[in-house]
Amino acid sequence: MDIRIEKTEKAIKNAFMQLRSKKPMEKITVKELCSLACINKSTFYSHYEDLYALSETMETETVNSVLKSIPHAQEYTFDNLDVVAKELCLAFVSHISLIQVLFSGKGHSYLADKLETEIKKKVFEKYPEYKEDEEKNILLSFCIQGAYYAYWHNQEIGVETLSQVIEHIVKVLQKL
């Protein structure tokens, strides 16, 4: 990628994050983003259709980054869901400031759904027979969504304790 394009992308994303940390998505205008990024509107529109497309791009990048930070992501099985759930919790911690800004308000449930979709996609690529297995689908949804919401609503608890409890719960569920 051309260095100028890369610099412009970075300026747009940084400006968006600054604005998004201060106000809801609906209150941000392209004009103020462009002013903060020191670009003109035509430059913004040459990169993104609108602010929602920019937000979607950044959300997808964040989900991919969270997934890439899970050490055993390529080893998803139903035998080690406890480890995956724990590592998913730890991945949230490593991306928390970005997650809190991009997915604030109603957006945090959107993150959980995107993570579930992407993790299931990876599991089903590796184990296509699981796609039609209702029990495995429910267990996978429960582990992903459960780990996410347990983390989201209990951030004040130490991450080590939280991740150990999540790992233990999933371990118990696996035996059912």
Image (cartoon, rainbow, N blue to C red):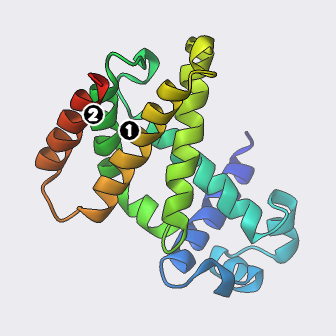
Q: Do labels 1 and 2 touch, CB within 8 Å?
A: yes
The residue nearer to you, when weighing 31 against 149, is 149
**Label ID, residue 143:** 1
Q: Residue at x 34, y 46 (%)?
A: 147
Disc 1 on helix, strand or loop?
helix
In the shown orientation, is residue 106 left or right of residue 96?
Answer: right
Q: Residue at x 36, y 56 (%)?
A: 149
Q: Which x, y percent locates residue 146?
A: 36, 47
Tell me if residue 99 can be seen. Answer: yes
Tell me where residue 74 appears, x and y as whole percent: 45, 18
Q: Which badge, 1 or 2, is on the more N-terminal residue?
A: 1
Q: Residue 170 carries which label?
A: 2
Q: The C terminus is located in which quarter? A: top left
Query: How busy is the neighbourhood of tag 2: few (under 14 within 10 Å), some, or many (20 plus)?
Result: many
19 relative to 157, above or below: below
Query: Is residue 96 left or right of 14 when viewed as pictured?
Result: left
Residue 68 visible in image: no
Residue 75 x/y as whole percent = 41, 15
Q: What residue type is labelled 2?
A: Val
Check the image and report above or below for 127 versus 101. Answer: above
